[in-house]
Image: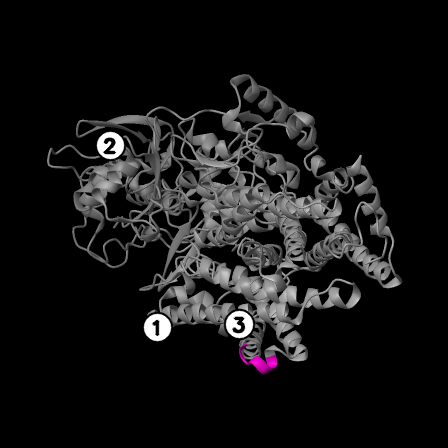
Amino acid sequence: MTGNKRTRAGANALLLAVALAAWAAGSGAESLSPSPGPATSAAEGGEDFPVPFNPLPKTITPCRACHGPEKDFKINWTREEALRVHTNIRLHHGGVRVWCLDCHSAEKRNYLLPLSDGKPITFEHSYELCGKCHGTKYRDWRNGIHGKRTGYWNGPKTYHLCTQCHNPHRPRFRPIKPKPPPKRPRSPVEASTKH
Amino acid sequence: MVKSAFLASAAKRLVTGPRTYYLWVGLLLVVALTGLAAYSRQVTTGLVVTGLTSYVPWGLYIGNFTFLVGVAAAAVLLIIPAYIYDFGPIKEIVIIGEALAVSALIMVLLFVTADMGRPDRLWHLVPGWGILNLPSSLLGWDIVVVNGYLFLNLFIPGYLLYKAYQMKEPNKSFIIPFILLSIPWAVSIHTVTAFIYNGLASRPFWNASILAPRFLASAFCSGPALIILVYQIIRKYTKFHVKDEALFTIAEIICYAMAINLFLLGAEFFKELYSDTHHLSPLKYLYNGLHGKHALVPWIRTALCFNLIAFLIFLVPATRKNFKTLNIACVMIIIGIWIEKGMGLIVPGFIPAPLGEVWEYSPSPVEILVTLGIWATGMLVFTMILKIIIPIETGDFTKEGGTSSA
Amino acid sequence: MSRRKDDAASPSGNDQQTGSGTADDPKAAGGLEKKAGVSRRRFLAGTAGLFGMITVSSCSWDEFFQQNFRRMTREEIDQTLARLQAQYKAKYGKDFVVGAEGPIDGTLFGYALDIQRCIGCRRCVYACVEENNQSRDPQIQYIRVLRFRDGNMDFEESDLYYDPDRVPQEGYYYLPVQCQHCENAPCTKVCPVQATWKEPDGIVVVDYNWCIGCRYCMAACPYMGRWFNWADPVIPAEELNTRTHYLGNRPRFRNIVEKCTFCIQRVRKGRYPACVEVCPVGARKFGNLLDPASEVSRILRDKRVFRLKEELNTQPKFYYFFGL
């Protein structure tokens, strides 16, 4: 009986790992440009601005399939260098300072840690959590200074969420391949510039 | 009736002449037509057939344009005193100076047109029908002053010669105001041309107030030097007489002008070298090369040497009054100024580009052919004008009709 | 395909564009090969004798005598737009929309670029080329991305042609330069025929049908913001953007000057310029300087900004800022 349960848990973990890998790749630095979904409106500090749904794959949300009070997994409060299950995640957020449970709610795995109001934050509103540490960035993002918006400069815009550009586990952008340089102008003179 | 008789007999003079005349005109026609063929290629393909690029959008055409505006201005400035003070030796050569100015102006207009991407839209420049952007565009002003100057230089000698042809005295109170007007006008065409470049803050090489004075000074070298050579040719092949004294006087003027030109160049050198800012780069490129690019260096150094040697020749009375050395100096000065004020002025203005790229320019074969073609056309015009006016001046061609050939 | 730029705002288009930079390159090269045929055909059509400049773009009398855009009446503009649409249809076999939307009241466009965030990937360069129907050969690219060594801002030391495997590179930073849409524009001042001017919303535009091709504006511009069509532009037909504006991205022809218009065909309809939307790091910001709540206005208030060559008093409306 126990063995059976363990197998199922293992299968779930595997499924989750695959899903997470897809997510991490999708929101990682390799594809810097995110894929916003339909815009919704979220009240934020009295200010209305449109926010797209978080592009998390549907498969990722039932974290509670593994993590939860009714499950075997115990909450591990100690920091470890290597993640035993989520091996695809290479955590490098704020150097080594940030650990899983600094963001993820330990008890409610489908949510992120709450703000002072105690209400856990959904993945769709992850930027609220990001703003806890990155206050000035958060302010700039809300003002349209940081981050990216598309749409209308005088109308509806699509905001790109923090995690759409930054992989939350490895927020720093990774270098990408640049588009080709311009052709040097045609000229009878031997083609070369400075240096 | 008199007019048509004048035109008919003038036309007859143009097509008759000695064998050397036919050879000369034939040669010019061939070069001009080759230029026209090259130009038609430029028109149908685009300016891509030139050596110009986004980095250096002006080149050989505009360089020649600038040089020739100087020639046109100087040709008249030189002879104005003759009108005013009735200085004998120079007076007889006044009209030929104006003919030179007219020819130079025609070349000026042709060079500007050749440089234009869309000559079919020339009418856009006509005030009223099109828009001439005055007062803010210096190119707009240049079009005004060059065309006005062309009119003056056609009208004044035209009037005087026509009177001479009719064997009447010109009405002085009628023509003197025009002559007086042409003095500031001659200064203005070259000043405005200098201002075309001078006004561009994006190009530090040109954005120095010394540019306009330098333009005038160098114009007083190249224009008169050309005149000295032309007069010697004319007096060799025609009955038209020019006294040596007149040529030596012109040579003296060149000497002063070159002294001023060299002084202004020195002032420019000092300012740039001593302050040693980024504005030094174009000058560095021109005289010494920049980032390994030095296409203009041999040219400008040649120009500098020629100008210096010619200056010394003009300075020493013995060499100035010896036609052998005088002619060598004249040729040197013409070449020297042509380099200095042509490619040597235009191209470094663009190097380095405002965003730092050092991209060199050299004219393409099409550009060179068109340029030669325009020069040939100018010389053709000049020959034609001389063919008519010299006999009038010498009294061979009047309405009573002498028919000796030029 | 021609609507691609408008669609680029949608997720999938964007993702592909940025996700597969490498895969894009061969495609672009393939596109360029096709243009040879187009060019020959047009060359034959255009070679109509010595003074065939009237035929430069299969010209009609209407086109030849077309007035300066700012002098046209409403009807004349409508006629011109209709004629251009017919002309483009005949030439490219596509239905073009040539608009002439005027400025929106109360707008003065401004641009801000986060110099600390730009990674020099040149996505903006190519998005701009496609949106604005720039010639692929001879190549015209309104945006130049310059690479500087850290600690140096000397243009002569900068590199336009950098081509590493990955950007950003250690020890370098990047400075994209395009038309700065100066309030005190040296280029419009010098034009002998007023073929270029500053619109009421601050965009510096060119009337391609009025430009005489003298290139004085190119000599006057301190930012290399102006480009000349040295030959007939070549654009693969399938890459043409058919949503155009008379003063913006409508197809051009040889021997006239063109430039960045802040994507006038987009921004006059409220949309962001193409370069803003494509930037993978969100370094490019655009908006109304007269609106205190706009992104650019906030940047000018909250951030430290600079403009290129302030000493020339060109008063660009293109700001560089330090976003970090």
Residue that badge 3 annotates = B255
Q: What's the residue at 41%, 26% (across, down)? A: C103
Q: Nearer the viewer, residue A12 or B80?
A: B80
Residue B361 to residue A173: above or below:
below
Assess whether residue B174 is covered by the magenta stretch.
Answer: no
User: In the picture provided, is A27 more to the left or to the right than C47?
Assistant: left
Q: Quadrant of residue C11?
A: top left
Residue C71 to residue B383: above or below:
above
The magenta stretch spans which residues? B315-319
State which mark lies toward you, 2 or 3.
3
Label 1 sits on a secondary structure element that is helix
- Spot the residue most to the top: C75
- Spot the residue most to the bottom: B318
Please report whichever mark, 1 or 3, sits nearer to the chain's N-terminal start.
3
User: In the picture provided, is B41 more to the left or to the right than B90?
Assistant: right
Instruction: Give how far across and how far down residue B295 sits, in percent.
Output: 57, 70
The dominant secondary structure in magenta is helix
Q: Nearer the viewer, residue B67 or C162?
A: B67
Residue B133 to residue B276: above or below:
above
Query: Do discs 1 and 3 share a chain?
Result: yes
